[in-house]
Every structure is written in structure tokens, then in C-alpha cells.
Amino acid sequence: MSSHSLDVYMPIVILMSFGVVMLFGALLVGKLIRPNNPNQLKQTEYECGEEPVGVAWSNFNVRFYLVALIFIIFDVEGALMFPVAAVFKKFNEIGEGGIVLITFLLFISVLLEGLVYCWKKGDLDWIRSFQGPVTGPSTDNDKDAK
């Protein structure tokens, strides 16, 4: 490769180097000027101004995490849809609209497949019974139906 073709990357290298120097410079200046006097009060946990009560390690229902994870997945999906919608007309004008549409629909179908999987598995049911199906007492009408 000639040195001329690598010259176009020099502004990017300079900008990235400047960013790294600024990052470490800010961390160094913060380390030098901040006070460092730990005491017992500063070492305690802070819970909205209240004294901590009990242990911090408690079990949470896993459904909180599942709902949060599903929310994040579909939130990112929504964030990724806007740029595609913004440039779709340009791709359509140059004849690439079909490929973009198929890719976009494939992306949505994979996410919808994941949603259906979670739904069928019962992860979206907030109150889920871990017991078998509830069967009531049999009546005479049930015997006649058989």
C-alpha cells in the first residue's frame, strides 16, 4: 500500500489519540485535586438518607429481570428502526429498497419469534402457577360428555 492511501486515516488517528489523552488527563486531574479522607460514615451504604436495615443480599423474582430484558430488546429494536425508516426512500430510489425491506422484515421477524417464544414459555405471565393445571370436582355433566 502506498503512503498516500494511508494519509486519509491520519485525522481519525489524531482525533482518537486526542480523545484518549483527554480521557486519561481528566482522570488524572480528578485524582490529583479531589480530597481523600475516608471515614466510617463515608464507608456506610447510602439508602436515600436512611440508615441501612438488614442485609443487602435478597432474592428478587426472576420475572423482574426477564421483563427488563425484553423491554431493552424491544427498545433497541425501536431505536434501530428509525434510521432505517429515515433512509429507506433513498435506498428505494437507487433500487436497493427491496433488499433493505427484506432485511428489515427479517430483523423484525427474529424479534417477534423471540417474543412468541417467551409468550408460549409463560415468561410474560406475571402471576404464573408452578403447579399443574387445576382440576375441579367432576360433575355428572362431565360423565355425560365422555
Image (spheres, grey):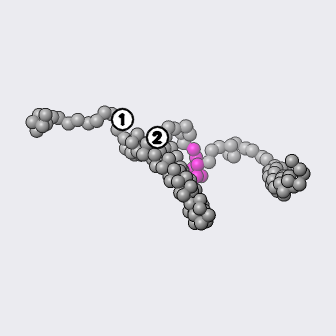
Residue 66 lies, in percent from the top left, at 48, 44
Foreground: 64 or 57? 64
For badge 2, the amino acid type reads Asn
Left or right of 10 on screen, residue 71: left
Main SS class of the magenta portion in the image: loop
> Residue at image x 58%, y 52%?
48
Please rate how many residues cluster around mark 2, counting C-alpha atoms within 10 Å: few if below 14, some from 14 to 19, many from 20: few
Give SS at disc 1. Answer: loop
Residue stretch in magenta: 47-52
Q: Which residue is mark 1?
A: 130
Q: Is residue 50 magenta?
A: yes
Local secondary structure at mark 2: loop
Using the image, determine if residue 131 lies above or below residue 116: above
Q: Residue at x 28, y 35 (%)?
A: 133
Amino acid found under the numbered disc labelled 1: Phe
Residue lying at the far right in this picture: please name it.
3
The residue closer to the viewer here, 57 or 51, is 57
Which quadrant is home to the C terminus? top left
Residue 25 in view (yes/no): no
Neighbour tally class for label 1: few under 14, some 14-19, many 20 plus, Cα within 10 Å: few
First in sequence: mark 1 or mark 2?
Answer: 2
Spatial CA distance of label 1 from label 2 is: 14 Å
Side of 24 where 95 appears, left or right: left
> Residue 61 got which mark?
2
